Amino acid sequence: MSQFRYEIVRNYGVLSVSESGWTKELNLVSFNDQLPKYDIREWSPDRSKMSRGLRFEKDELLKLNELISELE
């Protein structure tokens, strides 16, 4: 079985920090040497562990931005 790999290509920022130190972040991440995608998930303080997250293509993230800007 091959090993799971990831690379945080770019960190766009931290959305929140939990009491345990985990950070919810928006990053551009490549998993298993695939093309990087925009990714929102929680990371442990040393980034050795991660939660389940959401991954977006650029057009999906731009659409999400449009929807968020319409919130009251």
Image (cartoon, helix red, strand yellow):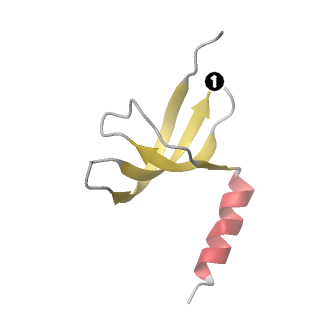
Instruction: Decide if residue 36 is on the left or right side of residue 50.
Output: right
Q: Residue at x 35, y 39 (%)?
A: 44
Instruction: Decide if residue 53 is on the left or right side of residue 66.
Output: left
Above or below 40: residue 31: above
Q: Amino acid at mark 1?
A: Asn
Quarter placement of the C terminus = bottom right
Q: Residue at x 51, y 29 (%)?
A: 7
Q: Which residue does the numbered mark 1 point to in the structure image?
A: 32
Q: Residue at x 66, y 74 (%)?
A: 66
> Residue 61's image quarter?
bottom right
Instruction: For label 1, count other residues whose C-alpha is less than 10 Å away and answer few (under 14), some (14-19) or many (20+).
Output: few
Instruction: Decide if residue 36 is on the left or right side of residue 9.
Output: right
At mark 1, the secondary structure is loop
**Residue 49 percent location from the top left of the image:** 42, 33
Label total for image: 1
Q: Residue furthest top?
A: 1
Between 19 and 58, the residue placed more toward the observer is 19
Quarter placement of the N terminus = top right
Q: Residue at x 66, y 76 (%)?
A: 67
> Residue 71's image quarter?
bottom right
**Residue 62 percent location from the top left of the image:** 67, 64
